[in-house]
Image (cartoon, rainbow, N blue to C red):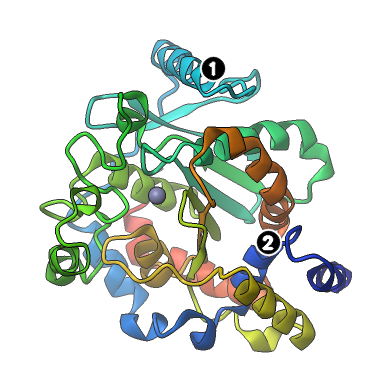
Amino acid sequence: MPELVSQMWICSRSARAVFLLSVLALLVTVNSYALGNKNQASGHSLESSIQSVTSSSPSQVISSTDSEEIERLCEKMRASVKSLKWDVEPCPPDIEWKIGGQSVEGQPLVHAEIGNPHSKNTTLVFSMVHGDEVTPLYLGLELLQWVRMNRDTLGDFRLIVAPLINPDSFFKKPRSRVNSRGVDVNRNFPTRDWNERALKAWKVRFHSNPRRFPGKEADSEPETRYQRELIALAKPIKILSVHAPLNFMDYDGPSQLSLARFPKDYVQECLKLRKSLKATSGGFFPGSLGNYAGQELGIPTLTLELPSADPTKARGYWEQFRPGIRTMIEYQMPEVALRAITDRMTSTQWRENTIH
Ligand SMILES: [Zn+2]
């Protein structure tokens, strides 16, 4: 495995340059030691999870390319990008935005796809889930631009990026973490433990902090439903959600990607690296994407928290994390893990809830 050998070499050379290569490492090395006991907290079958989380709310992903609506969004994004002093074009030629939902205030929720449409090596990227964390937007937009320009040099992949999950809160002044109804859309996913734990955790752990409000009921927010429906539609085998500014990296997902399947030295180096960067788990939250997609649907899900939301640092973060994100996009899941993930996706429950 020359690719892994070269990554192992890099791992032992420069911690900073391979921060996101350790993201890859997390994809393959997560075990109960590294993660605490999160996997043990979800001892239920995926099928029952899918059934329970989707039956109450049928998928409604539209796939519109309404050009006027998209142009209005592009204009707003251009103005915001300009005010943040970023040199990035949100709507370049050859990137076709598709509208997959509408925010609380009726703004389009968009994603774009690039790469081999028939590839099973699908990565789904979310950014700007929280409207006041601006640096992830830069990464989402730049990622699309960069992949567009470098497509021929990349391996087999299919990439779907939804760079602006929470447009209402991003466009308003002042910006806010929660959506227009005051809900944290990353605590609103209909995880199995939501009814029992979400509001309780909010009151006890977060002292009813309004910035963390999970909603009055699960799956109530269009920005959450859009992410959920995009997962059902795209069937990714890897998910990356980019946030700021907590400076951590979190993994949720199946334990099939275990230490035993990869060279021991590589794994150990990357675990050490993870420790040295203090890239520890961000915790376990009812209603979070990691809990929903990683723990319950079994899709390897990474939450990357950039070190800050300072817009002047966005370009630096992109440069820093680009090699790791590239590795993640190109990374071919080991056959055994791919089979486990795709078997779940072809289950009756998953099929019934997928939009065509
Ligand atoms: Zn966030």
Q: Is residue 319 visible?
A: yes
Q: Which residue is mark 2?
A: 19
Total tally of numbered discs in the picture: 2
Residue at 46% of width from left, 28% of height from top? 98
Q: How dense is the environment of label 2, judged by Cα within 10 Å: few (below 14), some, or many (20 and up)?
A: many
The kind of residue on which mark 2 rests is Phe
Q: Which mark is residue 201?
A: none
| Secondary structure of the residue carrying numbered label 2 | loop
* Residue position marked by numbered label 1 in the rendering: 82
Q: Position of residue 176 (x, y in %)?
A: 30, 36
Q: Residue at x 32, y 64 (%)?
A: 349
Does 301 sit above or below residue 133?
Answer: below
**How far across and down, in percent of the image, does residue 52 sit?**
22, 66
From the top left corner, tell me how far across and down residue 259 is, in percent: 65, 85
Q: Vertically, is 17 above or below 51? A: above
Earlier in the chain: of badge 1 and badge 2, it is 2
Please report the residue visible at 38 percent of the width from the left and 15 percent of the height from the top. Answer: 69
Q: Specify few, some or many for label 1: CA neighbours under 10 Å numbering under 14, 14-19, or 20 or more.
A: few
Q: Position of residue 106 (x, y in %)?
A: 25, 24
For mark 1, give the secondary structure. Answer: helix
When asked about the image quadrant of residue 265, the answer is bottom right
- Which quadrant of the figure contains the C terminus? top left
Residue extending farthest left: 216
Residue closer to the observer: 285 or 46: 285
Q: Amino acid at mark 1?
A: Lys
Q: Do tag 1 and tag 2 residues touch (Cβ < 8 Å)? A: no
